[in-house]
Amino acid sequence: MTRDTAPATEERQRDADRSQGTILAAARDEFAEHGLGGARMDRIAERAGLNKRLIYYYFEDKEKLFQAVLEQAYRDIREEEHKLRLLDLKPADALRRLVEFTWNYYLAHPEFLTLLNSANLHRARHLQESKRAREMNSPLIEMLAEILERGRKDGSFRGGVDPLQLYVSIAGLSYFYLSNSHTLSAIFGRDLLSAKAKNERLTHMCDVILGYVLRN
């Protein structure tokens, strides 16, 4: 009589998925705090509560682990963006929603910004080697292009707007402000992270982006 091994195989896969998820979360925090250069596999294992050999088994080395963390970071933000169902909204409302989401996501996930800082220090070589990262991010630009085209057709948006350039502007307006909030606050003598300042910033960003795309 042949024994069904499927349940045992599925359980092992669930255990592996859980272990990898735990490692990625621990590694994300370690890389966000110390950068790629300062991160230590021993500390990642300690954060994860797992044997270091298991990390090497799943991810081979620190470089591959950092790449996996970056891929997971992009997967997380793209999945949250997908939940916005932007294509169900009017074009102007969709753009405003995307600006608001990007700002609030960066506020809620400062580790995302520090991971990007670390990736850029290393000239994004880990992302250049990642087909997954490109595949995850391309649909966002395609969706933005569709929103812009719908707005052009209904007469609310002007034509000729590059969706990639527009998204870089949306992300950059939030990213620069938050990444440099301490220096900007110091040199201009204003607390740019106060509740009032953050609300003002979000209003300004929405005005800038919509002012660019809306037909006068």
Image: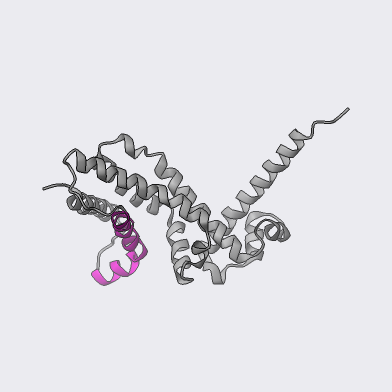
Confirm whether the magenta stretch covers residue 198.
Answer: no
Q: Out of 187 and 175, give the one closest to the viewer.
A: 175
Quarter-wise, where is residue 66 in the image? bottom right
Q: Out of 160 and 194, give the one closest to the viewer.
A: 160
User: Is 40 rendered above or below residue 137?
Assistant: below
Percent x, y for residue 53? Answer: 73, 60
Q: Out of 104 and 57, give the one closest to the viewer.
A: 57
Percent x, y for residue 196? Answer: 25, 53
Q: Does 61 sit left or right of 32 as displayed? A: right
User: Is 190 rendered above or below residue 135?
Assistant: below
**Residue at (35, 44) in percent of width and height:** 143
**Residue at (21, 53) in percent of width and height:** 160
Quarter-wise, where is residue 157 in the image? top left
Q: Does 107 sit left or right of 92 as displayed? A: right
Q: Does 109 sit left or right of 61 as displayed? A: left
Percent x, y for residue 188? Answer: 24, 69
Dominant secondary-structure state across the stretch colored magenta:
helix
Q: What residue range appears in magenta?
A: 164-188
